[in-house]
């Protein structure tokens, strides 16, 4: 039996193949969004994010991974020194943003960075308790 015959004789699971295809399409769609995008599960743990979010926050790259808690990302951002109003009060800032995150009603929020750029953020809750957010950084 040749190698190609062996490969073609391996049975595949159509449901698994469909799941892989849908996951790939979802990942491509997330990466096509021009804003930063992150999805958290009902326990506020990262379950998906796009490349734009990584580009917007390069200092968070080591922290931004599937399975990381929302508060841990906030803490990393506060400790990076990029958030002027968080300097010297990092844990208080983390608590403030974590509380606002619990509402996640789509109300726009802004965060000014130390370099003068402004992040505009919208967060939403899903019917099953997860949340997702869009982020856009001003070009200033």
Image (cartoon, helix red, strand yellow):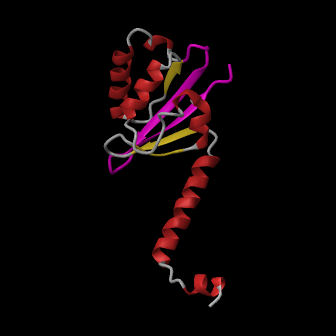
Residue 48, horizontal then vertical, whole percent: 48, 47
Query: In the drawing, does residue 16 fall left or right of residue 101?
Result: right
Front position in the image: 65 or 35 = 65
Q: Residue at x 39, y 16 (%)?
A: 90
Vertical side of 123 occupied by 19: above or below: below
Determine the image quadrant of residue 26.
bottom right
Vertical side of 124 occupied by 80: above or below: above
Query: In the drawing, does residue 21 fall left or right of residue 95?
Result: right
Residue 85, horizontal then vertical, whole percent: 46, 11
Q: Residue at x 44, y 10 (%)?
A: 87
Q: Residue furthest front?
A: 1
Answer whether residue 95 is magenta in the image: no
Answer whether residue 137 is magenta in the image: yes
Front position in the image: 100 or 16 = 16
Identify the image quadrant of the C terminus. top right
Q: Residue furthest right?
A: 139
Vertical side of 127 occupied by 36: above or below: above
Identify the image quadrant of the N terminus. bottom right
Q: Residue at x 38, y 24 (%)?
A: 97
Q: Residue at x 50, y 15 (%)?
A: 81
Q: What segment carries the magenta color?
A: 113-140
Residue 83, horizontal then vertical, whole percent: 50, 16
Q: What is the tally of numbered marks visible in this picture?
A: 0
Residue 84, horizontal then vertical, whole percent: 50, 12
């Amino acid at each position: 039996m040749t190698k190609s015959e062996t490969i073609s004789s391996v049975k595949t699971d159509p449901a698994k193949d469909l799941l892989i295809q849908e996951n790939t399409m979802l990942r491509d769609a997330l990466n096509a969004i021009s804003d930063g995008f992150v999805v958290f599960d009902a326990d506020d743990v990262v379950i998906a994010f796009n490349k734009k979010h990584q580009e917007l926050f390069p200092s968070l790259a080591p922290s931004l991974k599937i399975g990381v808690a929302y508060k841990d990302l906030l803490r990393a951002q506060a400790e990076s020194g990029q958030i002027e109003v968080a300097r010297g009060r990092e844990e208080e800032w983390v608590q403030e943003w974590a509380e606002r995150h619990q509402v996640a009603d789509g109300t726009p929020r802004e965060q000014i960075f130390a370099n003068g750029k402004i992040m505009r953020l919208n967060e939403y809750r899903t019917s099953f308790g997860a949340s997702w957010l869009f982020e856009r950084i001003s070009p200033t």
